Image: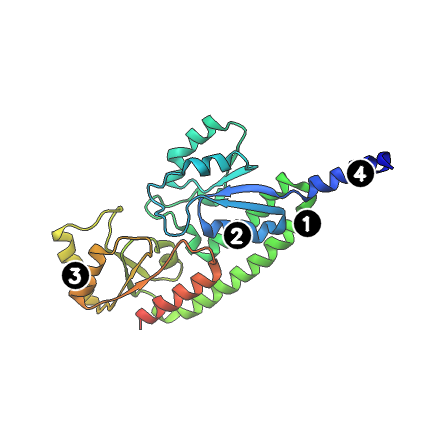
Amino acid sequence: MLAKRVLFCLLLLPALALAEPLRLAVSVSPIAWLVQQVGGDRVRVQTLVRPGQDLHGFEPTPTQLGELQQATAYLTLNLPFERAWLPRVRAVNPQLQVVALQSGHALDLHDPHIWLNPQRMHDLAGELAVLLSTLAPQERDRFAANAAAVAGRLATLDSELAARFAAARGQTFLVHHAAWGHFAHRYGLTQLAIEQDGKEPGPRRLAKLTARVRALGIDTLFIEPQASRHTAQGLADALHLALIPLDPMAGDYMVNLRRSAAAIAQALR
C-alpha cells in the first residue's frame, strides 16, 4: 500500500511542477495588470511601486528585495529608478533574470508613463506573450490567446478615447506633475504641468504659468493622489481652479483610463 502511494506521488510531480506559476516582478501596477492579463493563472506578479508611492526616486525596501529573490524574472521598462538600483539587485541576486521589455526602449526620460497610451500597451501585450512563452513554452498557446484578447480590449479602449477627444484636439489641460504626456500626444492634446523636471516652479515661472492658465480659460487642475498638494492647492485657490485627482499608477488599468479620460474631457468643455 505504501509503495503504491509513493508511486502515485512520483507520478504527480510533473503535474505539480506545471501547476507552479511563474513568479514575475515589475515596477508599476499598470504593467503588473497587463502581465496578469497575458499570463492568467500561470503567473504571480510582484509590483514594486505600490499605490500612493512616488515613481521618481523610488527605492525598494529590504522586504521587496528579499521577495525579488523568489522571482523567476524581473521585467524592466528601463525606468529611471530601475537603472539606479537594478545593478545592486543583480549583485545580491545574480540568479535573477532581468528582461528588458522592448517597448521601453523608446522611453521618454522626462515622462516614463508610457502605459497611459493604450497603443503602447497593445504592443506590449504581444511582446509579453512571446516573453512568457520562452519561460513556459508549454503555455505558448494560452499566452497568445490571452494576449490577443487583451489587445482587442485595448484597441477598443483606444478607439473610444480617440473618438471622445476628436473635437478637442489642440486643447490644453493643466496637471501638477507631467505624467500625462504620452496620453496627451496620442489624442492630440497639450499637457501643461506645474512641476518641471520634478521641481516646483519659482516665482517667475509661476507668474508665467498663472498668466497662461488665465489666457486659456483653464478651470481645472489635475493632481496625482500621491503628490504634495502645497503648491497645487495655492494655485488652485488663487485661480479658483477645481482640484481633481488623476492617478497614472492605478492598477485597474482600463477602468482608471476611462475614468481619467472622462475627467479630462469634462475639463476641456
Q: Label 1 to label 4, Cα distance in Å?
A: 25 Å
Which label's residue is closer to the chain start, 3 or 2? Answer: 2
Q: Residues within 10 Å of mark 1 (few under 14, many from 20)?
A: few
Between 254 and 230, the residue placed more toward the observer is 230
Residue under numbered circle 2: 34
Q: How crowded is mark 3: few (under 14 residues within 10 Å), some or many (20 or more)?
A: some
Q: Which residue is pictured at 40% across the width and 58% down the height?
A: 186
Which label's residue is closer to the chain start, 1 or 2? Answer: 2
Q: Which residue lies furthest to the right in this view?
A: 1
Q: Where is residue 157 in the image (x, y as percent from the top left)?
A: 49, 64
Between 251 and 176, the residue placed more toward the observer is 251
Q: Residues within 10 Å of mark 4 (few under 14, many from 20)?
A: few
Q: Which residue is pictured at 50% across the width and 28% down the height?
A: 93
Which label's residue is closer to the chain start, 1 or 3? Answer: 1
Q: Which residue is pictured at 24% across the width and 49% down the height?
A: 196
Q: Position of residue 144 (x, y in %)?
A: 63, 51
> Closer to the observer: label 1 or label 4?
4
Q: Label 3 to label 4, Cα distance in Å?
A: 72 Å
Residue under numbered circle 4: 11
Element at label 1: helix
Element at label 4: helix
Which label's residue is closer to the chain start, 1 or 4? Answer: 4
> Which of the numbered marks, if any, corresponds to residue 210?
3
